[in-house]
Image (cartoon, rainbow, N blue to C red):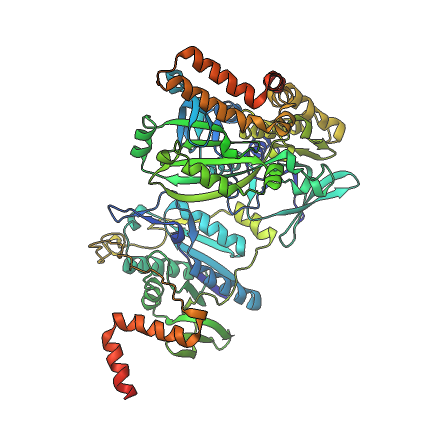
Amino acid sequence: MHSVVCIKQVPDSAQIRVHPVTNTIMRQGVPAIINPYDLFALEEALRLKDRFGGTVTVVTMGPPMAEAALRKCLSYGADDAILVSDRAFAGSDTLATSYALATTIKKIMGNMPVDLIFTGKQTIDGDTAQVGPGIAKRLDYQLLTYVSKIVDLDLEKKEITVERRAEGGVQLLKTATPCLITMLEGTNEMRFGDLDDLFRAARYDLKVWNREAAGIDDAEMIGLKGSPTVVSKVFAPRPRSQRAEMVETVDNDPKNLAVTLLAKVFTQHPKLEKEIAKRAG
Amino acid sequence: MAEKFDVIVVGAGMAGNAAAYTLAKGGLKVLQIERGETPGSKNVQGAILYSDAIEKIIPDFRDDAPLERHLIEQRVWILDDNSYVGTNYRSEDFNKPPYNRYTIIRAHFDQWFSKKAREVGALTICETTVTELLLDGKKVVGVMTDRKGGEIYADAVILADGVNSRLATKAGFHPEIKPKDVALAVKEIHFLPQETIEARFNIGEEEGVVIEMAGTISEGMMGTAFLYTNKESITLGIGCMLSDFKKQKTTPYELLDKMKKHPSIAPLIEGGEMKEYAAHLIPEGGYNAVPQVYGDGWLIAGDAGMFVNGIHREGSNLAMTTGMLAAQTLVELKQAGKAFTAPNLSKYKAKLDDSFVMKDLKKYRRMPDIFHKNNQFFTTYPTLLSKAAQTIIRVDGVDKKTKEKEIKKSFIASRSVFGLIGDAFKFWRAME
């Protein structure tokens, strides 16, 4: 049983500021964290390893500083970590990134067959949710997005059954492995790693693969050249004017309150008043 | 966990990092354990870095340490409710490298410092809390952590776990700290464009200003306030003795809010975006509060040992120095093939006594007590001083001699002649 978990190191978006004049994101001093959605993917892979044994390999594409994110994954219990890092990757959009990661995973498969690939449902910086599906497509794997639960995994039959959140309900899906799963948030809770894992993570000789090592021959497919996406404009949406108004009436009698409230609503939405009056006959 | 270390350092603050670095450089097998997510993530300081202490540990720290601004000007303000009387000292001598003092952001600096320790061979693990010390009789033989498989053994443990050293208290090495021996300080970081800061404080790129303040802003409590310029932010804060907060039923954030509205301070931070709020206990018990700092297999360094000079606002340099001295003691013993027993570790105490750390603490040993009992230094005098300054400066047709008499009268009315002489004597005793 071999799972590959793709993670990304992202700026902690809770601490990001947007420059008031240029509208660019100010990243200085903002701590880098593991994309929180990816942690659900990693934990799910670790849980399968607890049940079935095997290996969990974590992969990320990013600058050298992403090493910290990988070490953290190792401290949670991942067995191996690969940092795919090369200046040639700079400027990659989701098309180029999924190409680079899919190629990297093919390379990993050369050493050890892969049963499952995990990603988070999306990243908190790009929010596209495209890289996971992109990897699945390129590897010609079945794709299971927004998975909330792994119900069953049959390694002999090579079948997996999952629950997937869909609009209006939960789908129960069964498919063949190997496949790619994007995990939904809140589905599990990241473990507190053992001391042994912590020590191993601190001392681990991390693999850093450049473009060639990752098996990417065609440089046209990655970086800016491989990225058709163009950012034409960045803007901060104008904040909606939201001012809460406290409505009070004598004794706060519910009926009075309702009448006062409706009167306030109708002054802003006269059509609504007519509509309700019409229906009431 | 079967692995054994020469030394375990608990904490990755100034003392812990100094100790881990010195130990690893000295060839010992070191494990450093930090409870925060990263080294520095839980550490709070003003913060000013004194070059001397770090230079003794990492001479070329200026090459890559994250430093904000070197300080070229020191202002000391005595505040009453709407004025300040103060002195400024600014010198080009402070503007020539190697610089003497810097403002720093601890979250950045501590990560750098810890990285330096790792580079020379220390092993650092974070997000791990040491829950207690492992004892064999009276000898410390390791630590217990909150992780699975959490026992780790070592020949010695350096406790650099901060002011509230739970470990030392739990092990009975020193008593619970008393509210009269700690200050509670709060601070905020306000972001402002670099150019705004430089214009407001009349400084160039990389140059910085410190304002130390005391007076009625502490509402009669024993305490001081500060304002430091960073590269793109201003740090300001205020701290008073915990026992005073308790007595007065004032909250620290109320004081800080009042401070931010003070007419002398408000314009300096106007338009800033508050990004960080932190609170911290500062050990200010001084010389008399320093506990036993060594024993069989253990040493205490930094805030955990109450090594803070409250009068001169020095703490991190004492932390680094004590961390370094504790480590040097262990390195020397190891090299001499001696065990880390209490009699052998007494060398640490001798090193401390011989350094500026204990000498300075001893010099001001009476200070906490005198200020505790005489709150006029924080209430009456600032107001009198401000009035006196105004009387002299305001031109209103009154002759100077009459004005001088008025000032004299106001001092005597508030404190009586004996009171004034007594206060002067107390102040001198405290400083002596």
Residue furthest top as drawn:
B401
Q: Residue at x 66, y 43 (%)?
A: B166
Location of residue A131 (image quadrant): bottom left
Residue furthest bottom as drawn:
A281
Along the line of sight, which residue is nearer the eye, B298 or B239? B239
List x then y, in percent, for residue B332.
66, 25
Observer able to see residue A123? yes
In this picture, is A228 found above or below B11?
below
Observer able to see residue A178? no
Along the line of sight, which residue is nearer the eye, A262 or B3? A262
Q: Which residue is drawn at 21% across and 58% down?
A: A228
State the count of labels.
0
In this picture, is B432 found above or below B271?
above
Q: Residue at x 73, y 39 (%)?
A: B140
List x then y, in percent, for residue B312.
54, 24
Residue furthest left as drawn:
A232
